Each structure stands twice: as C-alpha cells, then as structure tokens.
Amino acid sequence: MAHARPIATTRSATGIPTPRLAVWWILASEVVIFGGLLGVYIMHRIGHPEWAEAASHTQTWIGAINTFVLLTSSFTCVLAHQAAEKGNGKEAAKLLGFTILGALMFLMIKSYEWTTEIIAGYTITANTFWSFYYTAAGLHALHVIAGAIIMGFIAVDAFRGRELHRVEIIGIYWHFVDVVWIFLFPLLYIAK
Amino acid sequence: MADTVADVHQHETHGHDDHHHDQGWVSKYLFSTDHKIIGMQYMFTGMFMAVIGGYMAYVFRMQLAFPGISVPGFGQVSPGEYNALITNHGSIMIFWVAMPVLIAAFGNFLIPLMIGADDMVFPRINRLSFQVFFLSSVVLLGSLFVEGGGFGGAWTSYPPLSASGDYNQTHLGASLWLIAVALEFVAFLLGGINFITTLMNSRAPGMKAYDIPLVCWMIVIASILFMLSVGPLLAGAVMLLFDQTLNTGFYDPARGGDPILWQHLFWFFGHPEVYVVLLPAIGITVDVMATFARKKIFGYKMVLYTAVATGVLSFFVWAHHQFIAGIDPRMANVFTITTLLISVPIAEMLFVMIATLYGGSIRLTTPMLWALSFMAEFLIGGVTGIFLGASGADIYFHDTYFVLAHFHYTFFPIAIIGTFCAFTYWFPKMFGRMMNDTLGKIHFWGTIIPFNFIFIPLFVLGMGGQHRRIYNFQHFPEIAGPEYFQLRQLATIALLVMLAFQLVFFYNVIVSWMRGEKAGKNPWKANTLEWTTESPPPHGNWPVDELPTVYRGPYEYGHPDREEDYWPQNLPG
C-alpha cells in the first residue's frame, strides 16, 4: 500500500500506547474464556467427588516439570523485554529464542505425557474428568503454540532492530499464558 | 477532490479512470483496510443476510398460517425443514444481521469519523475481522445444504437435542452451525478490541470523554459487554462441539455432565447480548433525536451512566430464561428482582428521549420518524418483558407465542428500526446524496403498521397458551381453534405486506444512490465531526493537515449566543 500509517495509529489520548492497551483488552477476553471453563470445571468437580479417582492417574511430576519449563521461559521473556528497552535488538531476539525453545520443550513434554495417558486408556471420552483435562490443557496448549509463532515473528523483527516495542507486548501475553497454567496445574494435577 | 466513495461506486460500472488506478478493484473493495469500506462490507453482507432471514420467516409463517400448502418459492415444508428454518432465522437475525449492521457496520463507519480520526487504530485487524465474519456467513449458509439439512435445534441450541446427531438428525448441520457461530464471535472480538482502543486513544485533540457522541460510547460499551460475556460461551461451544464430534459427555448427565450447564453458559452470554445490540440502537436514536429536535440531549451523562448500569446489571439476569428449567426457586426470586431492576435504567433512557423532544423544534424527517417509532415500539417490548421477568407469570408464558412476540418487539426496534434510522440519517454521508423523503416515508409506514399487525396477534395467541415450537397446529386440535387460525393468518398476511414494502426501500436506495440530490457536507445541520468533511469522506476522512480539533460537546443546538441554531464541535470560540 502506498499510503503512510494512519494518523489514528499514532495518537494516544489515554497516554497508554495503543498496542499495550489492546493486549490488555485481549487478555480480558481471554480471562473470561478460561474463567468460564475453569469455573465450570470447579463446580463439576465439587459435585463429583468420585472424579478424584480419575484425577489420581494424572502424572503430577510431569506437570511439575512443565510448570518449571514455562516459568523459566517467562523469565527469559522478561530479560528480552529488558534488552529491548535498552535498544539491544539482537540480545532481545536471542532471549525470545530461548523463550520459544521453552515453549517447544513444554509442548514436547505434554505430547509425551498425553501419549502415555492415551495408551493407558485415559482418552478424552474415558470420563468427564478426562474430557475437562484434555479440553482445558488443550486450549492452553493452543495458546502456547500461537504465542510461540507470534514470538518468532517478533524475534526476527527485533534481530533487525525493528518494532522493539512489540517485545513487551508479546511478553505481557506470554505471562498470561503462564498464569493460566499456574491455575491449571493445581486444578488438574494436584487436586486429588 | 473527486476521490469519494460515490464516485468510486460509479467506477464499478464505468471502469476506473481516476488517480486510484494504482489500486485494483479487488484490493480496494475486497481487501481494503479503510474503515469506511469495511463498514460497507459489513453493511451489505448484513443486509444480504437480512433478506435471507426474511425469506425464512416468510416460508415458516406461510406453513403456520396455511399448514401443508406448497409455499411459493419454497415448496412443501417438512418438519425438519421447518426446524432448520426457525433455527437459522433466529441465528441469522441476531448474529448475522443485528450485530454486523448495528455494531460492526456503523461502528466502523462512524467511530473514526465522529472522533476525528482518519482510520481505526488497527486497520489490518479490522480487515481480518470482516474476513472472519464473511467466512462465518459462508459456513452458516453452507450448513443449510449439507446432508440432513441445516441445524434444527433452535438458535439457543439446548443439549441434549443439540449434542447428538442421533437426536437432532443433523450431524453435520449442527456442527457447522456451531463453528459458524464461534467464528462470528471471533470476528466480533477482533472488531470490538479495535473499537474500544480506537475510542480510547485516537480521539481528536480536545475531545474529552463527555464530548464523544453517544452513539460511539454505546457501540464501545456494547463491545465491552460482548467481550466480557462471550468467553464462557466460547468455552461452552468447544465443549458442545466435542460432545457432537468426539462423543464426550459434558452435557450428558449419565456421564457426569449437565445439560443445564449449557443454558447457563448460553444465557450468561445471551442476555448481555440483548443489551449489546440495544445500546447502539439507543445511541443512534438519541443522536438522531437531538439533531431533529434541534435541542441538546436532556441528560447526556444520564444516558451514559444508565448504559453502564445496564451493562453491569445485564450480567445478573440470565437465569430468567430458565425459570422452568428446574433451577432453585430461591434463585428464581433473585433473578426476578434483578430482571425487574434492569428495566429502570432502560426506562430512564426513554425518559431522556422524551425530555429531549419536549420543547424542541421537531422536524419529522424519515430518520426522525424511525427514531420516534423506536421509542414507541420498544416500549411495548420492554413492558411485556416485565410479565416474563416475573417468575410466577413466566411459568405460564414460557415458550409460548407471548415470549416470541415480546422479543420481536424488542429486537425489531433494535435491529430493523435502529438500522433504518441510522441508515437514512447517515446515507448522505455514506453516498453523498440525499434519500428520497417521500419514498422513505412510504417505506416507514409500510413497515411499522404491518409490523404491529404481525406481532400483536401473536401476543394474543401466546396468552391463549399456544406453544412456540409447533410445526402444524392441526396436529393439536385442542389448542388449534379456528379463531387462533385467523390470528395466525392475519400475522402472516401482515408479514407479506411488510416484506413487499421493503422493495420500496431497496428501490429508494438504488434511485437515490444514482440520481439523488447532492447532499453537501452537512445536510442536517448537525454538530458532530463526520459532518465537517466531504460527503462521502475521502480516503483518510480529512486532508492530513486539516484533521479537526474539538472545542465543545456534540449536542450544542439552539445555543442562545449564536445566530445559527447549531454549533459544530470543531468551530473555535
């Protein structure tokens, strides 16, 4: 397109940069999606104490490792933001690369975990606990995948020193993905 | 500047010969990031869907009034087809007509123009929003032609009927319907974030919160309501899709699920959704009334605060749809109270409208007639809602034609009257030409009078205990007396009359578009910023160095210090 960026995109009547404002609204909409799902799960769980038996077959130590992996990836994401603030695009890109590696490791561990569970017969239709388990964790995994892909684009831009403010935006989103997992882990794994 | 939308549309037929030939037709109209073009795309897609929804209404009303006849233009209606028709009529009219036209089309067209910006803050996300919406329309229309036909489990899609193809007999249709609705939600989440951030950040210099025209406020409050209510239903839709396709048991009590859960998730979204479409319609009518009463809105902040109050309350009324679904009667009392409470802010808005009209120099143009009729018709819808909100009365009225007539008396004023009001008011800005006022008034009376003849009989039928979801009343002789059949036939004939008068509207649009009187910048002598630029506005809305600055609120009509009775927002001093 020949024309320049619209002037609307450069204004900031609230004083908050528009991309940051938008990502918080996105998170608000995500909170109600996950909030709805987890709220429903909690109410069902209270109504069905017998699900504890099914829940006892989840592999808590795998979940714990994944929690650690995801938290570490958030840490490198914060460091990337710090580097971007200083204008060091190459450093930011490298650290975002570590975050993406963390995301990939999370997904690989999850694939291993689900494979063993499905082989053991705990499929999505085994009972409604497992339906919730796969739906909630699957929806979260989709967010991990989407975040990692977007982060890849931003890392390439950052490496060339462009659009460094976007590192913060993806960071906010990545922390949210992390926080969702912090809720999922005790609800799906620890609560027996 | 010849670079205007009206010229542009002539180029559709006369070829492109102006300085826009560096952009092809496709990139300009189908893949444009300009908010005005995207608004038009939403508008015309929505109007196309409205024609389909109206056609469906025609077919099933004919079946109801004259059971078993071969409906002209359709043929014999089988029970399955009847169910698919009513389901998709409801879905289309709410998700593919009311929302795209009232929120997306007018939101896209008006928000940047009214706040003095040259575009949305995320133009490409805006385009993506329309593309996802368009895809959702295609999926929905496609679902009508798959094996087994379109989904027939009502637009509320209650399980277990919707959860299993064994029950609803439309395996593929049910899943495609659900996917189409979910895609539509995604489109409006993308669009809504754009509206909210644009209004928050891209206002013209000098435009403070209380200088924003109410219609922009209302569309943004509606977008926030939508965003906060739709999430649980999106999660619920994924669960329902898994029940349909993977055979999980989220809504199956035999396997630890709960069918009432869907009703909670659906109406937790579904009731705020009523206000999602109502608020923009209120914003439109209030703006139009101020212009044509030549008076300041009686209570700008009152309307704004009551809209927020409505929004908050709307999250606590959902279970009034479920009074007979087996919910706890104590909970029913709570929801009765909240439901009756929510009529207070809405009534306040209507009082503000009346007070705005009082003492004004009212001009009965076509848009003003639509605005006044909105008040009158919506009042009937609101008042009948009191009966249904009271759990005692609702036990009798539930799922009768009374409910149906009630929500058509709310949705018709919102989606149809509100749209016509906005469309006739902003038509000069959109296309640069005035609409024919005589044809507009013929169309107005030809729509409003038959509308009442359709739905007042249905109130009577509902009070007689006629159930909503019956395909052929001859199968139920004990509730199908001849006097009821006459009322049903009256409603159907009124519908035919109303649909016929819509031809006047389409004729008027085409003729005015081609040969209407040139509108000029500000044909209505209104104050808001969109009237300070060319009609239709060029790309970028204003020349880059002439973007407006705002000095006052949007409704300064009849100010005593001025000779002219209006005072545009962008005039200094």
Image: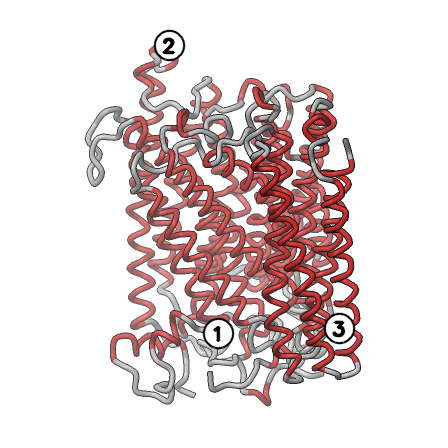
- Element at badge 2? helix
Residue sitting at x 44%, y 60%: B42
Q: Which residue is mark 3?
A: A80
Q: Which residue is mark 2?
A: B478
Separation of residues labelled 3 and 1 (CA atoms):
34 Å
Query: Which amino acid, mark 3?
Result: Ala
Residue sitting at x 68%, y 24%: B332
Separation of residues labelled 2 and 1 (CA atoms):
59 Å
Q: Quadrant of residue A14?
A: bottom right
Please tell me which of labels 2 and 1 falls first in the chain: 1
Does any portion of residue B50 appear in the rendered image? yes
Residue furthest toward the top? B478
Q: Find residue B549 and report its horizontal and vertical position in percent.
A: 66, 81
Query: Which amino acid, mark 1?
Result: Asp
Q: Find residue B466 and report its horizontal and vertical position in percent.
A: 43, 20
Classify mark 1: residues with Cα within 10 Å, few (<14), some (14-19) or many (20+).
many
Query: Which amino acid, mark 2?
Result: Glu
| Dot 1: chain letter | B
Q: Find residue B265 and report its horizontal and vertical position in percent.
A: 61, 36
Marks 2 and 3: CB-CB under 8 Å? no
Which is nearer the eye, B458 or B147? B147
